[in-house]
Image (cartoon, rainbow, N blue to C red):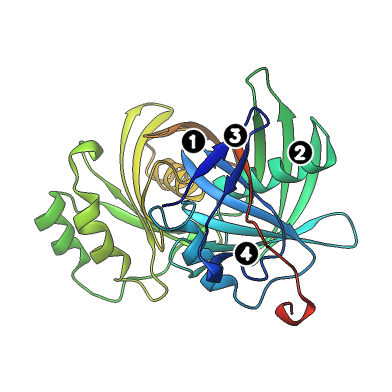
Amino acid sequence: MRQWEHDSEHTMTLDEPGRDMRRHFPRPLSKHHGLGNDFLVALVDSLPLDAAHLASALCDRRRGIGADGLIFGVERPDGGVAMRLLNADGSPAEISGNGLRCLAQAVARRDGRPHLELEVDTPAGVRHCSVHATAEPHTVVVTVDMGVVCPGPDPLVDDLDTTLTGRLGSSRWETADVGNPHLVIEVDEPELVDLAEIGPELEKLFPEGANVHVVTAIGPDEILLRVWERGAGLTEACGSGATAAAWVFNRWGRVGERVVVRMPGGDALVELGAAARLTGPATHVADIVLPGATAGPDDRH
């Protein structure tokens, strides 16, 4: 049975991790969450070859450490970082608003800087992060440039309206692309939707899969959102999804350009314009050491 030690410096030691999990792991990890959407972060010089396996092993909540995803922050010569995010199932993701905030906090902590401006290169493009200290222990507020939001992919089926009406009693939906694909569905009561059942079905109706959101407007500048994330399942919050939902509801004339998005894990602020900005907290949970971790050159590319 695994034993955890958690000291006052927020350092966790996993005494007996599986050998496959720790073998040649590049660095100690830190764990962070953005509104309950939790990530393991490793700041590295280059990606390990077995990154997908590491992600699925480490993110396993029963056999590993547990997280919604594993983020590699690959150092760049110009002082920025390249973000490579793997979902809990090992699949790659283009971008994550909450993940960007967690990565930015990890860099700020490493550099000992309470405030930080950081350029992050993602598969969806370069994103700028502004980190600001708060009075709350281990928590910073990060504003992320989420880029230009565009209409998303078309579904692979022609009868999505019929499916949504039959399953959710709603046929109002739209897709959005924030560097990754989203399906935004308007419902009366998001908390009553069985996303664990319908989320996986709807996710697969798009060419590259999609994050699925059930959303309602609760005021002229507020929406309530629940999410099924592609590759991670039910999560407490989704930063790119909050951005996508705010953009869709703004297009529908339901909210303005400054939108508070309320999610099970907490609230985020989305500001719309030529590009979207996402502001929310990132919280450092722990530093994690896998005993025997090494970084052999044969395991890098």
Task: Give how far apart the Cα atoms at labels 1 and 3 are.
Answer: 8 Å
Q: Where 278 falls versus 221 (above or below)?
A: below
Look at the image and tell me in which quarter the C terminus lies.
bottom right
Q: Is 36 in front, or is 295?
A: 295
Q: Earlier in the sequence, mark 2 or mark 4?
A: 2
Q: Which residue is mark 2?
A: 109
Task: Give how far apart the Cα atoms at labels 2 and 3 are.
Answer: 11 Å
Q: Is 155 in front, or is 239?
A: 239
Q: Earlier in the sequence, mark 2 or mark 3?
A: 2
Q: Residue furthest right?
A: 78
Q: Say which amino acid is labelled 1.
A: Leu
Q: Earlier in the sequence, mark 3 or mark 4?
A: 4
Name the element at disc 3: strand
Task: Give how far apart the Cα atoms at labels 1 and 4 are.
Answer: 22 Å
Q: Which residue is mark 1?
A: 35
Q: Which residue is mark 3?
A: 283
Q: Which residue is mark 4?
A: 124
